[in-house]
Image: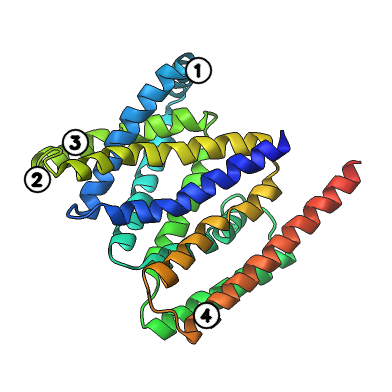
Amino acid sequence: MKNKGIIYGLSAYILWGLITLYWKLITGVSPLETMCYRIIWSFVFMIIFLVLSGNWPQFTKELKRLWEHKNYLALMAVAALLISINWFTFIFTVSAGHVMEVSLGYYINPLVNVLLATLVLKERLSRSGQIACGFVVIGVVLLSIQTGNIPYSSLILAFSFSIYGLIKKRIPISSMTGLTVETFVMLPFSLLYILLASPAGFMHYPLHTNILLMGAGVVTAIPLLLFAEAAKRTSYITLGFIQYVNPTMMLLFAVFLFHETYSLAQFTAFGFIWLGIVVFTYGTTRSAMKTKKLIQ
């Protein structure tokens, strides 16, 4: 069972890494329009999936719970906006040829989670967490000095996804219902943009481009569903190790496939970030093992 969870987790993070290549295949479509199609087809795919998988009764039950608690509905609307910002930033940054910035965003994302938990949930930041966050700040500052620009895309990706995750923890629904509701919230805005503002109109692209745009719903939903299964079957610590597969794949794509500039100075900056990750992972693992021994 545990090994199955690891396989699900690895599959999810590998697919999230490969999505970088998927957006590169879509040419001649603006990032905003691509995001709108991603929302539209993700919603369509999720409705089909819920019906065919037999999860429709669970979906309707969770919808009723959301309707009974209006504060959950408000949080879902905020979550939908945040994930849309995350998706747009991802697609825009990849399309602009800055895959390395995307990689950086997902490297620092776990540490941003810890930072937000400390600031918002008033959780105590461990010694290793403090050191790790310090190393990451040094790395980001070094990158900003070397490139002459603050890595806004990386920070938007990390913080939007972290705040999104923080909000989702407060809403007692499954990831299937969550994605369906989030895409439904943004669906009217996406349709309005496509129908009224898109220069090409609805799906008026070459056949291969239309197929890729429709497939955006599939490549969005499948990794999320795999991750949900992984989270049920394996430990949080194990998933903590696996999550770095995604940004590592992106970094390798950026350097060896897309030939983005990767100087010694940038390597040094990333080195501080990797050092922060090592310290954080070591501290988290050690703490979990101590807790396990106390329980036993």
| Residue type for callout 3 | Leu
For disc 3, the marked residue is 191
Measured as percent of width and height from the top left, residue 266 is found at: 48, 81
**287 relative to 184 in the view: left or right:** right
Q: Is residue 122 visible?
A: no
For disc 1, the marked residue is 58
Of badges 1 and 2, the one in the foreground is 2
For disc 4, the marked residue is 267
Measured as percent of width and height from the top left, residue 140 is found at: 49, 75
| Residue type for callout 1 | Gln
Q: Indicate the quadrant where residue 124 lies.
A: bottom right
Specify the label residue 200 is tagged with.
2
Residue visible at 68% across and 71% down?
131
Measured Cα–Cα span from mark 4 to mark 2:
42 Å
Q: Quadrant of the N terminus?
A: top right
Asked if the residue at tag 3 contacts the one at tag 4, i.e. Cβ–Cβ closer than 8 Å, the answer is: no
Measured Cα–Cα span from mark 3 to mark 1:
27 Å
Asked if the residue at tag 1 contacts the one at tag 3, i.e. Cβ–Cβ closer than 8 Å, the answer is: no
